[in-house]
Amino acid sequence: MNETSRETLRRIELTRIGEGRYKATNGRGGVLPIGSGDDPDFSPVELLLAALAGCGAIDLDLITGKRADPVSFDAVAEGHKVRDEQGSHLVGLTVSFDVTFPEGEAGDRAREVVPRTLAMIRDRLCTVGRTVALGEPVAYVEAEAATGP
């Protein structure tokens, strides 16, 4: 069984900055605006898609980058938002990578490991994708200190 501790904890804080707009802040001081989808800010669903693509991209880049730096590196994450007897959720989640490596031996070695790396990302490396695939329950609770008027 996995142990939880300060070292394993990942956390962000979210603050309302306007109607339907929020600011997420991480412990390193990074800030990300989040919106309801009625403004240019990323919606929560778009953030999930970005997290899936970003998580896989980091792993793919780390592993292939040991062999060759990519000439181009792009990804598209998509899924369909549905509402059914299970409530609102995404189906058909796909992350597609379009990565080009230079010609030559180093580029050939990088290209060669892409299929195996994508399988490793899906099966064990990408924390975001693994969490979605395993279906970890999410607890939505009221903070004890949030007892204002």
Image (spheres, grey):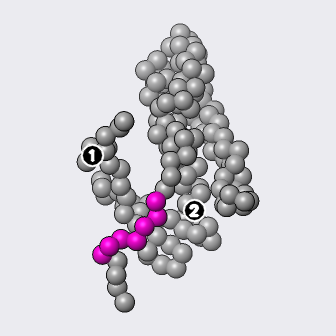
Number of residues whose C-alpha sits closer than 10 Å to that of mark 1, classed few (under 14), some (14–19) or many (20 or more): few
Describe residue 47's horizontal placement relative to residue 142 as left or right: right
Residue 140 located within the stretch drawn in magenta: yes
Describe residue 85's horizontal placement relative to residue 141 as left or right: right
- Cβ atoms under marks 1 and 2 closer than 8 Å: no
- Which residue type carries mark 2? Ser
Describe residue 115's horizontal placement relative to residue 82 as left or right: left
Residue 83 sits in which quadrant? bottom right
Q: Is residue 81 above or below residue 78?
A: below
The residues bearing labels 1 and 2 have C-alpha atoms spaced at a distance of 30 Å
Seen from the viewer's position, the closer of residues 74 and 137 is 137
Please tell me whether mark 1 sits on a helix, a strand or a loop. loop
Quadrant where the image shows the C terminus: bottom left
Seen from the viewer's position, the closer of residues 136 and 74 is 136
Task: Specify the label residue 5 is tagged with.
Answer: 1
Task: Specify the label residue 23 is tagged with.
Answer: none
Please tell me whether mark 2 sits on a helix, a strand or a loop. loop
Residue 89 sits in which quadrant? bottom right
- At x 27%, y 46%, the residue is 5
Which residue is disc 2 drawn over? 43
Q: Is residue 86 above or below residue 71?
A: below
Quadrant where the image shows the N terminus: top left
- At x 71%, y 52%, the residue is 80
